[in-house]
Amino acid sequence: MRTILIAEDSERKLVEQYLPGETNIFVTGVGALNVIRALRDLPRDTELINIGYAGSANFPIGTVVEVTESHLHHPGLNYAEPVLPLQPVDDLFFRALNPTRAICYSNTDFVTASPYNDCVFDMELAYICALGFTRVSAIKYVSDNLSLHTYREVSNSTL
């Protein structure tokens, strides 16, 4: 059985839209510490799909992204860190949407500026992947173009 991970209850509407019929939904909370606490005792062979809102410097709001790999967001520093590859989302309904495929950068704070394009930004995915789960997939809905105000408007709307 797969588990759908969302950071906040407001993201349940994304599950209904992109993976209709899924009922095994787990709310982690926002950010690294909440993710680590929420998932630390979950078996590492649990199939996880993280669905949530993400910012992007250049993807239009409303773009649906299937994440191919996850990294931490630290544009001012260059150091070696592992590549965290993700699995394709195994769902025929979602595949039919022909999502954009891109990298996701996770940050500890809301990203309001970055030199990175053709990617999305969140606050949880890299930490989920780093916990050692063997099958992680992710769907991100672009809610903003690095604007906290727009994110709040979109996440509180009915899509």
Image: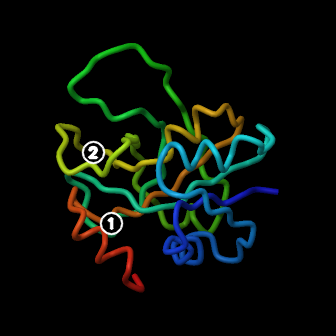
Q: With respect to residue 70, does 91 lie above or below?
A: below
Please report the residue visible at 22 percent of the width from the left and 43 percent of the height from the top.
117
Amino acid type, mark 1: Ser
User: Is residue 2 found left or right of 68 in the rendered image?
Assistant: right
Quarter where residue 42 is shown? top right
Determine whether, in the image, residue 22 is placed left or right of residue 106: right
**Kind of residue sitting beneath label 2:** Asp
- Left or right, 7 with reference to 22: left
Residue displayed at 20% across by 61% down: 147
- Residue denoted by label 2: 118
Q: Name the residue under label 1.
A: 143
Q: Residue at x 67, y 62 (%)?
A: 26
The x and y percentages for residue 14 are 51, 72
Q: Which of marks 2 and 1 is nearer the N terminus?
A: 2
Q: Residues within 10 Å of mark 2 (few under 14, many from 20)?
A: few
Q: In which quarter of the image is residue 54?
A: bottom left
Residue nearest the observer in this picture, 117 or 122: 122
**Crowdedness of circle 1 by 10 Å Cα count: few (<14), some, many (20+)?**
many
At mark 1, the secondary structure is strand
37 vs 138, nearest the viewer:
37
- Residue projecting furthest to the top: 80
Q: Where is residue 22 in the image (x, y as percent from the top left)?
A: 71, 71
